Amino acid sequence: MRRIKLRHIFVHKCDWCNREIILNGQNSDPYVVNAERKYFCIEQTPGKPAKRDCMQDYLNYNKRVGDDKISRQKKQKEKEKKIAAIPRVMAKAKTYQNHHQR
């Protein structure tokens, strides 16, 4: 009798939506792996936009969060510059007033 060879099916969870992805076999799901070795599921028919693209959602979310952090840092620096400029402005105003009072 011939022995049936068992094949292992590898399953991984999508790092964005936690959906199970079958990585190999006949019923494998389409997936994408990024440089950080994170797995993302994608549902797309050729020639049409993706119905579900978890990697794009992940990148958009990180970009938006990063932009928020950068904009907050810029606003904080502008506030610090304004606060630091107040003593100089006050000193100039006093000298201006003293000069014009004479």
Image (cartoon, rainbow, N blue to C red):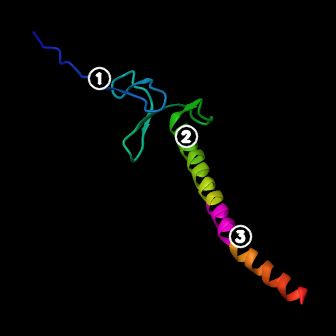
Residue 67 placement (x, y as % from top left): 60, 51
Point out the stretch of residues depicted in magenta: 77-86
Residue on which the image places disc 1: 9
Residue on which the image places disc 3: 86
Kindly identify the residue that appears in the image at 45 percent across and 31 percent down. 30
Q: Nearer the viewer, mark 3 or mark 2?
A: 3
In the image, residue 81 lies in the stretch drawn in magenta: yes
Kindly identify the residue that appears in the image at 69 percent across and 73 percent down. 87
Give, as a three-letter code, the residue at label 2.
Answer: Gln
Q: In the rendered view, does 73 fall on the left or right side of 22?
A: right
Residue on which the image places disc 2: 56
Q: Main secondary structure of the magenta part?
A: helix
In the image, residue 11 lies in the stretch drawn in magenta: no
Residue 4 placement (x, y as % from top left): 17, 14
Tell me the element at label 1: loop
Q: Separation of disc 3 and disc 1 at Cα?
A: 68 Å
Compared to 95, does 31 lie above or below? Answer: above
Quarter of the figure with the N terminus = top left
> Which of 36/66 is in front?
66
Q: Separation of disc 3 and disc 2 at Cα?
A: 45 Å
